[in-house]
Amino acid sequence: MRLQVDIDELLSLGQRWVELGSSPPGRCDALAAALRSLPGALPGVASLPDSATAPPWCRVLDAWSSAITDHGAALTASAGAYRLADDRTRVALGRPS
Amino acid sequence: MSLAPDVLPSVGQLRAADPAAVRAAASAARSTQRQVDQQLRVLSSGATAWAGPASAGASTRHTEICVVGDVLANALGHLATALERAADEVDAARHLLAHADLLCGQAGGHITDVGAVVGPLDPGAEPMIRATVVEARRRYAGSVLAVRQVEVPRWWSPGAASDGVLRPAAEEMGALGPSQPTEVRIPQGLGPQALATWFAALPVTVQAALIAGQPDAVAAAEGLPAWAHDTANRLRLAQATRAAVAALEAARSAALASPTPIDDLGLGALQTRVADLEAVTEVVQRQDGHERQLLTLDLTGRRVAVAVSTGDVDHAGQLAVFVPGFTVTPATHLRGYDARVTAASDLAGSIDRAWGAGAGVVGVTWLGYAAPQVDEVLSRSRSVAGRAPAAAGAARLRTFLDGLAVARETAQEATAPDVTIWAHSYGSLVAGAMLAGSRGEVTTVRAVVALGSPGMGVSDPRQLGLPLSDIFVAEAELDPVAEMGVFGSDPGHWEGVARLETEARHLPDGSSGVAGRGHESYLAPGSTSAWNLAAIAAGQPDLALARWRCDEPRVLRLRDPACRP
């Protein structure tokens, strides 16, 4: 069976996703702070909708970042599995790595 | 929204409002949106590091994550826009209050924080000051209305996938299994309304899984929001293009080795399929500042049927749907028509901002039916001389418009957009058949403009089911089709229906419109005709220039600069 995988590229792809998932949108501090100031900026306006508050946005931003990171980790783990399988195949066939 | 004065915010609260802080929140939302967009660009450019069945599951998961990111970015954009609008409303309310303060001060009085007007005021001025104060408070109270329409995407993940690892499939080391197998399926037997409600209730992660895993089913489901159709159709477009190019390459190779004449091998059909798909791809990927949506992609016919919008249909206040006619195909006409519809709908947006409510106008180039072709002229069922292609097209146009309306009405606190149809040539017969067939039923169509029409299939415009004041006709010089009148009576001779100017004229915005000549001139940028189409689509028909003599007692001529004394 021919292995149709570029393991190094897969590893690199996984690492890139992990890095992306850890980058700023996962930390929605600026957005949260700005939204928290809205009730003070709009005194007397009937209660602000959920969409104008920080928690739901931060939840979904964090979840999205985690999904990216998880997918990157999954790709990396898969690349590791492929490398292991590739090494075993080489050993079984008596070929140098 | 109309609130009684006793539940409105007080004058003191309006004075204490801080629109700059609201703008700062809008700016933060916009900045977060840009960060998500930036991440999406990187994610979308991911290289394929492996091949075969291996990549299918991971690829689907990749698509799901990108779809969710796209929805998230759009939602953040809507939040930013809504907050910007809220800040504008607060500013406007404060300006009103300042005006009332000034009037009151000039009269020797002042307005207290609780809204009382005190001082030795002119009894004639007091009611106006009080009314202005109440209007300012009312405007302030409604400043966050747009924010209420913003929905935060809801997240849900199956617990089974918590370790997140994509395990290699047992049967083949080259295979990766999906991390979250999608159990959700689009329910069968539901009408558009029920389907729209069902889809709207799903968390965005499940919506994304549906789109990534079942793009054909999502694309075919009427009533789903435009963004879902767009995302599914873009996936299908990429798949179909790959398949068509591969089939064409294979056929070419086979042709070289075959004694059969090349024309008999179906190469022509494959070439037109590839050409159609390439045209669609080029248009939906245009980088001109418009977020186009691929609303329809029907691959079942001889030619690809397609509908492309110039912007976000889910949030447009008004839609202008261009319905073209004879010989139209994506390969030959989509690029040009999209460019012209984009320019005309941009102009409509400008008119809407300057003279209207500023709710936004989005254009749609609707090649959603099988337009009759030159080589079908002798076909009984497909000839441009007959009504059958128009009848089939009318049914599809109605389904398309109904689907858009249902999706919008189901969205939170949203209403269906007003639709203006720009119907060109044989397309005016399609639009006429659709309107006449829908007579007495509720549709979203507010107005129709017949451009170079050979007839709309009716002898009396009242049969279209619209008020005569919402039906318009344009006939350019040197357009022989407009004089034909072969389908019903000639719209150019309809009593009580406005004929639009197509000659060079000064336009209400101070610019000059150029004359149109011939059958393809109606949407030409800079033309008087394009101005007229834009004004009607923007809901400002009084700004359209009618082809009346100035001594005729018509309402439209009153706004016509050429008719002013």
Image (cartoon, coloured by chain):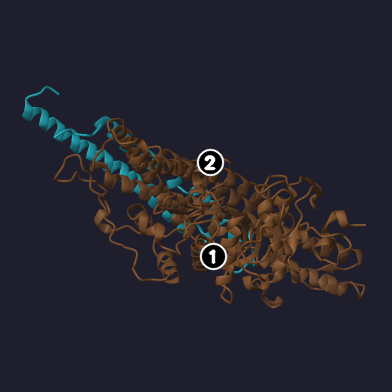
Left or right side of B293 for B506:
right
Please state the horizontal and vertical placement of residue A67, each as a whole percent of the image: 35, 49
Left or right side of A7 for A53:
right
Q: Quick one: label 1, few (<14), some, or many (20+) residues within 10 Å? A: some
Mark 2 lies on residue: B286
Asked whether the residues under marks 2 and 1 belong to the same chain, the reply is no
Q: Which chain is brown?
A: B
Q: Nearer the viewer, mark 2 or mark 1?
A: 2
> Amino acid under label 2?
Arg
Q: Give the quadrant of residue A46.
A: bottom right
> Amino acid under label 1?
Pro
Chain identifier of the residue bearing label 2 in the image: B
Query: Which residue corresponds to the image point at 58% horizontal and 57% vertical from the top-left?
Result: B427
Please state the horizontal and vertical placement of residue B192, each as a whole percent of the image: 44, 68
Q: Label for residue A49? A: 1
Query: Which residue corresponds to the image point at 51% horizontal and 47% vertical from the top-left?
Result: B33
Q: Colour of chain A?
A: cyan
Q: Secondary structure at mark 1?
A: loop
Please state the horizontal and vertical placement of residue A85, each as a whole percent of the image: 14, 35
Chain identifier of the residue bearing label 1 in the image: A
Q: Secondary structure at mark 2?
A: loop
